[in-house]
């Protein structure tokens, strides 16, 4: 699927940048000139605003209240993850531009930024849709928080705590009790993140599935589990020490208590990423050092 954006009407593009990268300062004038020339109003986050001539920034948390037609992310995978969580409600496509090495998500090198923008303007840029996960933290019957995750939801113990017990339910059916350091629920996109390091499988990003991976389980028979992304996944925490954390996409954790439940399901929103002609397996060979022919 390719996407083009008509130049006959005013459109809005947001620029989100990684902090303290000199490439942003060098790239921004030409990028903003290109966007203005193609009929975009440009809004910038606080990190990007530092390199403009006094342009008023818009907090990332406020981007979802704006109508956006395009989001340009200058940074790495972490910056793109942040942008996805803050702009998911807009359903605007994202162009992730990597300022370092090839990323799993931000695969477009800085040298290809303007050729990609030209391809977007001409309707020749392919878009890949990725699933998002909605996570709810429940204490009793009260929903204490609702969050979005693009990579993964992790329930984990602290460094000094003993192993916790986690009851896993899929569509309300009891699966098993896991005694482990933690539990990961990952999207296909997140299958190459923490879940992979914990022994989980690599899942192609377009597969309609979630991966449930125990972290250092006490029982060797507890293996990663792949379920359809239409399923509702629930983790019930049993912790004598009340020492566990919920983290989303690697962000700082939220304190959990004994009896808390973490419920995960596919979000009503999805992520649209502009892609290059670099296929997923090339990225795997490059990032994971798989052998070439």
Image (cartoon, grey):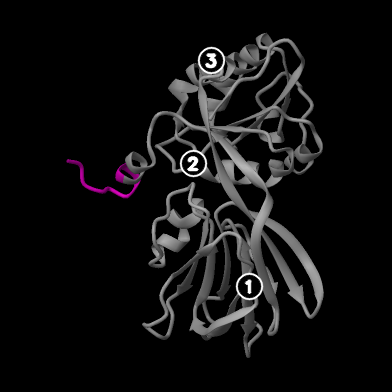
Highlighted magenta segment, given as a residue range: 285-293
**Mark 2 residue crowding within 10 angstroms, few (<14) / some (14–19) / many (20+):** many
Q: In this view, does 45 lie above or below 55?
A: below
User: Does residue 12 appear in this view?
Assistant: yes
x and y percentages locating residue 104 in the rendered image: 44, 43
User: Considering the numbered disc 3 on the image, is that residue within a helix, a strand or a loop?
Assistant: helix
Q: Which of marks 3 and 1 is in front?
A: 1
Q: Mark 3 points at which residue?
A: 118
Q: Mark 1 points at which residue?
A: 171
Quarter of the C terminus within the rendering: top left
Count of numbered labels shown in the rendering: 3
Rendering quarter of residue 11: top right
Residue 186 in the magenta stretch? The answer is: no
Q: In this view, does 202 lie to the left or right of 113?
A: left
Q: In this view, does 162 lie above or below 190?
A: below
Q: Mark 2 points at which residue?
A: 105
**Mark 1 residue crowding within 10 angstroms, few (<14) / some (14–19) / many (20+):** few
Q: Is residue 45 above or below residue 26?
A: below
The mark that comes first in sequence, 1 or 2, is 2
* Residue visible at 48% across and 17% down in the picture: 115
User: Considering the numbered disc 2 on the image, is that residue within a helix, a strand or a loop?
Assistant: loop
């Amino acid at each position: 699927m390719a996407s083009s954006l008509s130049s006959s009407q005013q459109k809005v593009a947001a620029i989100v940048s990684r902090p303290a990268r000199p490439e942003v300062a060098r790239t921004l004038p030409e990028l903003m000139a290109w966007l203005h020339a193609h009929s975009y109003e440009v809004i910038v986050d606080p990190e990007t605003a530092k390199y403009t001539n006094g342009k008023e920034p818009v907090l990332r948390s406020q981007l979802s209240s704006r109508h956006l037609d395009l989001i340009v992310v200058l940074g790495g995978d972490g910056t793109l993850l942040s942008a996805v969580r803050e702009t998911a409600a807009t359903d605007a496509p994202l162009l992730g531009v990597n300022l370092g090495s090839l990323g799993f998500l931000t695969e477009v090198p800085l040298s290809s930024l303007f050729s990609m923008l030209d391809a977007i303007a001409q309707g020749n840029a392919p878009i890949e849709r990725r699933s998002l996960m909605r996570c709810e933290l429940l204490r009793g019957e009260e929903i204490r928080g609702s969050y979005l995750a693009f990579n993964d939801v992790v329930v984990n113990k602290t460094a000094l705590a003993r192993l916790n017990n986690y009851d896993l339910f899929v569509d309300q059916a009891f699966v098993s009790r896991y005694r482990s350091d933690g539990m990961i629920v990952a999207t296909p996109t997140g299958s190459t993140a923490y879940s992979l390091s914990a022994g989980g499988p690599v899942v192609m990003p377009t597969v309609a599935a979630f991966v449930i991976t125990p972290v250092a389980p006490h029982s060797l028979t507890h293996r990663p589990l792949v379920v359809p992304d239409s399923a509702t996944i629930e983790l019930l925490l049993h912790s004598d020490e009340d020492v566990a954390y919920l983290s989303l996409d690697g962000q700082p954790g939220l304190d959990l208590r004994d009896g808390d439940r973490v419920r995960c399901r596919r979000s009503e929103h999805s992520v649209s990423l502009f892609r290059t002609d670099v296929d997923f397996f090339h990225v795997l060979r490059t990032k994971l050092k798989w052998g070439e022919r």
